[in-house]
Image (cartoon, helix red, strand yellow):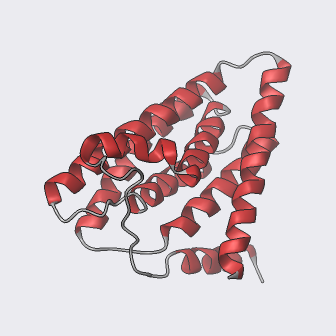
Amino acid sequence: MTTRAAASCAVSYAMTTAPAHAHTVIEGVSGFPGGLLHPLLVPAHLLLLLTLGLLAGQQRAAHRRVLIPLLPLSQIAAVLLIASAFAFDSQIAILLVCAIAGILVAFGRALPLICTAALTAGGGVALMLDSVPALTSVRETLAALSGTAFSALALFALVATISARLTQPWPIVAGRVLGSWAAASAILVLALRLGT
């Protein structure tokens, strides 16, 4: 099987449709505040944003200037998909992006912009599709998704900025170890999800 065929199979599997899973993270906290807390309290979302931020921090400054605004643009695209009632199992996509980004962080190399941009955009879309709250009000749903987008961007940009400023060897190694742990965690959860 060629690399292109394997990639096509992986993308096709990740894009299979399934019912959307609406949820709230903390009962009673909805709207914008609930959205703000969502990516910080859902482990897969937090892990995704950390690994994408670490990966962006390892790239050249010119790439980071593209990647940081790319996340909210991909989140806007996801909201448009949500408005059109598009649904797929975004948890698998989140775990796949997290695993790939974590492995790339562990390698610690600068990558072509297209690679990091695809991971950032894919992660942003998957994160938003998985963050749709269990609300019937369009206004409340948009408020919650706005909070999620704001919080995700803030965390992503913060981790990318801190990671980019690491110059001493031990923090750089610590970031790479964190990336490998994130990849291992995502792969384990992915194996459990696909195995059941």
x and y percentages locating residue 101 in the rendered image: 67, 50
Quadrant assignment, res 184: bottom right
Is 178 or 73 nearer to us in this picture?
Answer: 178
x and y percentages locating residue 147 in the rendered image: 31, 42
Screen quadrant of the N terminus: bottom right
Residue at 23 percent across and 66 percent down: it is 83
Quadrant assignment, res 84: bottom left
Residue at 58 percent across and 49 percent down: it is 48
Is 169 or 110 nearer to us in this picture?
Answer: 169
- Residue 44 visible from this viewpoint: yes
Residue at 39 percent across and 57 percent down: it is 131
Relative to 87, 42 lies left or right: right
Q: Is residue 167 above or below residue 40?
A: above
Relative to 160, 2 lies left or right: right
Count of number-bearing discs: 0
x and y percentages locating residue 102 in the rendered image: 71, 48
